[in-house]
Image (spheres, rainbow, N blue to C red):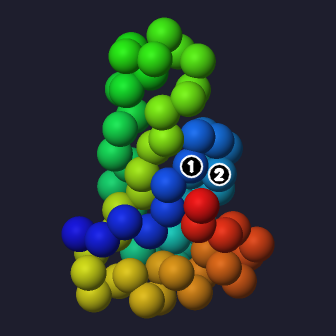
Amino acid sequence: MKELLRTTDPTVIAFATALLDGEGIRAFDLDVHMSVLDGSMGILPRRLMVRDEDHAAASRVIRDNGIEPE
């Protein structure tokens, strides 16, 4: 698996996941429950992962829709 996106904004993760689902690319959201450690302040970034063979296509999809990896 490769990291596609890292952000503290949960709406970006949701939007990117929806875009990838529409293209038939499965994404896996990591660090979802890390808010327990930061007191639900949202300071720890979440990562969106995709399979190695889907990374190039997934990168194109999110960039074409205005999402820039942080």
Out of 34 and 29, give the one closest to the viewer. Answer: 34
Q: Amino acid at mark 2?
A: Val
Q: Give the quarter of the image for residue 65.
A: bottom right
Q: Give the quarter of the image for residue 30.
A: top left
Is 28 positioned to the left or the right of 13 in the image? left
Is 8 positioned to the left or the right of 37 in the image? right
| Residue 41 point in image, percent of width and height | 58, 18
Residue drawn at (37%, 66%) of the image: 3
Residue for badge 2: 12
Q: How many marks?
A: 2
Query: Label 2 neighbourhood size at 10 Å, few (<14), some (14-19), many (20+)?
Result: some
Out of 47 and 26, give the one closest to the viewer. Answer: 47
| Residue 42 point in image, percent of width and height | 57, 26
Whichever of callouts 1 and 2 sits on the residue coming sooner in the sequence is 1
| Labels 1 & 2 near each other (Cβ < 8 A) | yes
| Residue 48 point in image, percent of width and height | 42, 57
Disc 1 to disc 2, C-alpha distance:
7 Å
Residue drawn at (47%, 88%) of the image: 57
- Label number found at residue 7: 1
Q: Amino acid at mark 1?
A: Thr
Quadrant for the N terminus in the image: bottom left
Residue drawn at (66%, 79%) of the image: 63
Disc nearest the viewer among 1 and 2: 1
The answer to whether residue 56 shows anywhere in this view is yes
Q: Give the quarter of the image for residue 69.
A: bottom right
